[in-house]
Image (tube, rainbow, N blue to C red):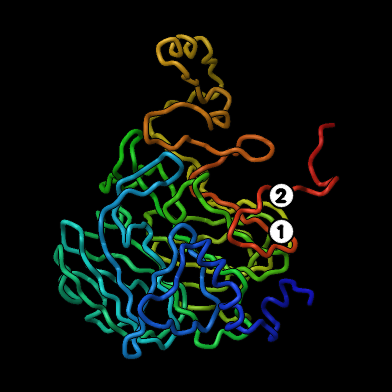
């Protein structure tokens, strides 16, 4: 069947959700780290499961009709990009923590173990829960002391892309990485089901070059921007076969908004933290601003083969290790000074006189991501940070591995004249 953007919204002949979930289980587990339940048979989702690159989805057990999950808050090392390691806080050894995935109407129990050195809570951001389960320290209920495990339990009364995070010393704990996504599928997805369903969390960090821990006291001077706790070229690409229906969900608990822009496609803004938007109220765009404390879902048909950039359109957010004290050197001839410095610092590379795109291989302090990193088939990639790729291929069936770079058909590349 020919699939286009109109059929994405209007067709009632969507693929059955059960067959989608079964047919893509192994690919999802390979891509996202797995989401199989341990110790009990998982309850089938009413929609195909989500893919959370680098992070995976939280396993659960079915215990007397309740889906039981286990979150463990703690400190750990995480590799933001090859060779760049940061000491952060999060859940189950990851920031963001693993995605919790369930279905509208499910009864869920989340066991939260606190392995931090201070008290914490978990707030179920945007979710309709009993007051005592809301996770606001000193108001909703008690905090979780270090070394203890508390159980949060409630019935899911809604659907949509939600989040979880602490509400206890939250400025520090959020800045250190404690957050995650909570995806609740509609009980009856109908024609709204998709083939590929990606989940990303944005975040901002202040990690001075050469250091290993974020500065949680930062208010504006952030220098590292991540998608699912990674910076390009450490971010995994999204994969889709030509004609597949794709959903991208983005959550933002950083201190700045992120206008997320997709190349090569227009999408429908299809969901918020308030749930799915009815088809007749959706609007088409190529960029969606994800404000602080919100989520956004976008749906589209991957009908344009190629390697397509997906990134925040705040230009500093697609760079790494930005400094707020570097003088403006545009137009300055640095060659003489650079030669003298290079005699003292082997490998030194001047920057700024003619732009910074040549800095992708430049030296820097240990444990620091280059400002721009990675190389494509035609040379250096002039972006880093909050950036990844959507790779669309005709006939793609193996979603467990990167298909490599796209080979444009003859006549579709710019040429020298």
The mark that comes first in sequence, 1 or 2, is 1
Vertical relation: 205 (above or below) 152:
above
Residue drawn at x 19%, y 71% as measured from the top left:
149
Q: Look at mark 2 in the image and give the residue it sits on.
A: 406
Q: Look at mark 1 in the image and give the residue it sits on.
A: 393
The reply to whether residue 369 is in sight is yes
Q: Residue 302 sits in which quadrant?
A: bottom right
Q: Is 346 placed left or right of 209 in the picture? A: right
Residue drawn at x 48%, y 35% as measured from the top left:
371
Q: Is 109 placed left or right of 147 in the picture? A: right
Residue drawn at x 60%, y 75% as measured from the top left:
23
The quadrant in which the N terminus is found is bottom right
Q: Secondary structure at mark 1?
A: strand
Residue 254: percent from left, percent from top: 38, 56
The quadrant in which the C terminus is found is top right
Do the residues under discs 1 and 2 have CB atoms within 8 angstroms?
yes
Q: Is residue 380 or residue 166 the one in the foreground? A: 380
Q: CA distance from mark 1 to mark 2?
A: 8 Å
């Amino acid at each position: 069947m020919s699939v286009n953007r109109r059929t994405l919204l209007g067709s009632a002949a969507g693929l059955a959700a059960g067959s989608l979930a079964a047919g893509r289980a192994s690919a999802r587990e390979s891509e996202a780290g797995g989401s199989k339940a341990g110790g009990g048979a998982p309850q089938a989702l009413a929609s195909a499961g989500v893919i959370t690159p680098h992070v995976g989805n939280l396993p659960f057990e079915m215990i007397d009709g309740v889906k039981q999950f286990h979150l463990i808050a703690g400190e750990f090392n995480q590799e933001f990009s090859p060779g760049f390691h940061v000491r952060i806080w999060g859940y189950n050894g990851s920031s963001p923590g693993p995605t919790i995935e369930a279905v509208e109407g499910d009864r869920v129990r989340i066991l939260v173990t606190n392995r931090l050195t201070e008290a914490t809570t978990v707030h179920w951001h945007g979710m309709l829960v009993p007051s005592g389960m809301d996770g606001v320290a000193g108001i909703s209920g008690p905090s979780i002391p270090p070394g203890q495990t508390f159980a949060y339990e409630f019935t899911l009364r809604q659907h949509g892309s939600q989040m979880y995070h602490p509400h206890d010393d939250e400025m520090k704990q959020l800045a250190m990485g404690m957050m995650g996504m909570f995806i609740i599928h509609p009980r009856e997805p109908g024609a709204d089901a998709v083939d590929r369903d990606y989940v990303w969390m944005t975040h901002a960090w202040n990690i001075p070059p050469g250091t290993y821990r974020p500065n949680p006291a930062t208010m504006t001077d952030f220098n590292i921007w991540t998608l699912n706790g990674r910076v390009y070229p450490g971010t995994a690409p999204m994969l889709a076969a030509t004609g597949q229906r794709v959903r991208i969900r983005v959550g933002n608990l950083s201190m700045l908004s992120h206008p997320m822009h997709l190349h090569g496609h227009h999408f429908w803004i299809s969901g918020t933290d308030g749930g799915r938007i009815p088809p007749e109220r959706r609007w088409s765009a190529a960029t969606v601003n994800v404000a602080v404390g919100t989520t956004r879902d976008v749906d589209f048909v991957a009908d344009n083969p190629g390697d397509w950039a997906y990134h925040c359109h705040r230009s500093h957010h697609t760079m790494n290790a930005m400094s707020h004290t570097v003088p403006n050197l545009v137009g300055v001839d640095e060659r003489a000074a650079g030669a003298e410095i290079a005699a003292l610092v082997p490998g030194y590379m001047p920057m700024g006189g003619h732009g910074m795109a040549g800095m992708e291989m430049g030296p820097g302090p240990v444990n620091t991501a280059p400002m721009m990193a990675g190389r494509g088939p035609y040379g250096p990639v002039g972006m880093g940070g909050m950036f990844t790729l959507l790779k669309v291929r005709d006939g793609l069936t193996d979603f467990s591995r990167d298909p490599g770079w796209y080979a444009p058909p003859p006549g579709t590349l710019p040429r020298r004249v």
